[in-house]
């Protein structure tokens, strides 16, 4: 199959590599000419996958028209905050036959709509959301990874499952599109909290509590938005939460650790050097929690640390001293 990836960040590049080795004809679009040249000439992407050599058959381009000439699958690998802008850019080139796939995790920062709704609003098309516990570094190394494809378009979901499944990448299907999206977005907030706890030095007990109570927040807001609670016990909920809260591959956890050590948000994000999706997600779900009247105390605490100048240690102690209640 012919696949085009929009965005040569860590995950877009890793999946493009995996799909090239799986025998697909892959084009990787990026707005940076330096990145495009490095991929085509040196077969490297030092900024995002410094230890990985990319296949020579993987072709990169800055020419959007060339990238969108005739893909069967068009994969949006840009940050969640850039998905709406990217849909507008590609609109003139779409033929209506390509399957749209989104691997970003988050909601639209302006409207707070799930990303699948952005595709409907901007393009009048259903997209397939591909999500799950899948750090780019491990996908690029060919380590066993599982993900979930979800869409209201059954045929498109099946084709994505078949196209992306390899000896080391196993794709499941899940019809709870909203649940898949919410799990992938909110776990980034909880990973920030887990990292902050690590950075302060609170230990494993505190992190276990944050992860468990974080799952309760994901379920509460998910059910309020219309998702099925069972989805959050699967790969895009529990699975993604575990890997993002515990791995040093996780940029959200790394950012949290730096915040817990006393760095400012600006200093922490600059040191991570990549987009930290949990920051935008915190803003979005803080607002959604108030709008929907859903209790999300961990999200509130992370918001206080990021945007209200509350010290990490104080925010965690506030969580510990909330009103006593049943689990």
Image (spheres, rainbow, N blue to C red):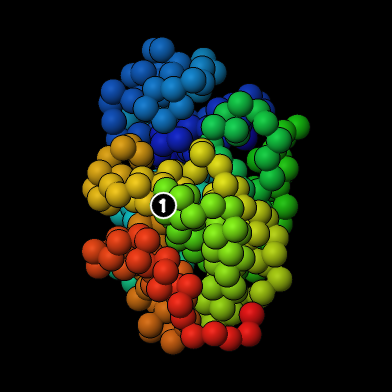
Q: Nearer the viewer, residue 255 or 185?
A: 255
Quick check: can you spot residue 276? Answer: no
Residue name at image x 43 percent, y 19 percent: 44
Quick check: can you spot residue 292? Answer: yes
Q: Nearer the viewer, residue 20 or 266?
A: 266
Residue indicated by mark 1: 200
Question: Is 236 drawn above or below residue 42 in the view shown?
Answer: below
Question: Is 238 drawn above or below residue 294 in the view shown?
Answer: above
Image quadrant of residue 210?
Answer: bottom right
Q: Nearer the viewer, residue 267 or 79?
A: 267
Is 241 positioned to the left or the right of 117 in the image? Answer: right
x%, y% of residue 173?
71, 57
Determine the secondary structure under disc 1: helix
x%, y% of residue 116?
49, 64
x%, y% of residue 137?
54, 32
Question: Is 46 drawn above or below residue 163 in the view shown?
Answer: above
| Farthest-out residue, right | 167
Q: Residues within 10 Å of mark 1 (few under 14, many from 20)?
A: some
Residue name at image x 59 percent, y 58 percent: 205
Is 221 positioned to the left or the right of 172 in the image? Answer: left
Residue name at image x 54 percent, y 85 percent: 324
Image quadrant of residue 179?
Answer: bottom right
Is 243 positioned to the left or the right of 321 in the image? Answer: right
Quadrant showing the C terminus? bottom right
Residue name at image x 33 percent, y 25 percent: 35
x%, y% of residue 29?
39, 34
């Amino acid at each position: 199959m012919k696949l085009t990836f929009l965005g040569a960040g860590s995950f877009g590049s890793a999946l493009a590599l995996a799909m090239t080795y799986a025998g697909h004809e892959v084009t990787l679009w990026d707005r940076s000419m330096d990145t495009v040249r490095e991929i085509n000439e040196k077969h490297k992407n030092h900024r995002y996958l410094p230890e990985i050599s990319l296949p020579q058959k993987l072709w990169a381009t800055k020419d959007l028209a060339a990238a969108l000439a005739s893909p069967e699958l068009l994969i949006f690998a840009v940050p969640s905050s850039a998905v709406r802008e990217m849909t507008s850019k590609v609109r003139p080139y779409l033929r209506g036959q390509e399957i749209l796939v989104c691997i970003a995790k988050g909601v639209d920062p302006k409207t707070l709509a799930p990303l699948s709704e952005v595709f409907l609003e901007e393009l009048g098309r259903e997209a397939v959301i591909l999500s799950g516990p899948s750090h780019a570094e491990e996908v690029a190394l060919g380590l066993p990874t599982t993900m979930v494809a979800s869409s209201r378009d059954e045929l498109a979901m099946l084709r994505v499952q078949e196209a992306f499944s390899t000896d080391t990448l196993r794709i499941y299907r899940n019809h709870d599109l909203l649940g898949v999206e919410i799990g992938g977005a909110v776990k980034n907030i909880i990973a920030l909290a887990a990292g902050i706890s690590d950075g302060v030095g609170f230990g494993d007990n505190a992190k276990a509590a944050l992860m468990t109570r974080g799952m309760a927040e994901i379920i509460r807001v998910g059910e309020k938005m219309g998702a099925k609670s069972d989805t959050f016990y699967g790969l895009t909920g529990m699975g993604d939460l575990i890997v993002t809260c515990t791995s040093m591959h996780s940029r959200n956890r790394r950012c949290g650790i730096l915040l817990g050590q006393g760095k400012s948000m600006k200093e922490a994000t600059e040191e991570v050097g990549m987009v930290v999706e949990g920051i935008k997600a915190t803003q979005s779900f803080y607002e959604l929690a108030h709008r929907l009247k859903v209790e999300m105390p961990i999200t509130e605490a992370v918001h206080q640390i990021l945007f209200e100048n509350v010290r990490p240690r104080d925010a965690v102690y506030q969580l510990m001293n909330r009103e006593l209640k049943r689990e």
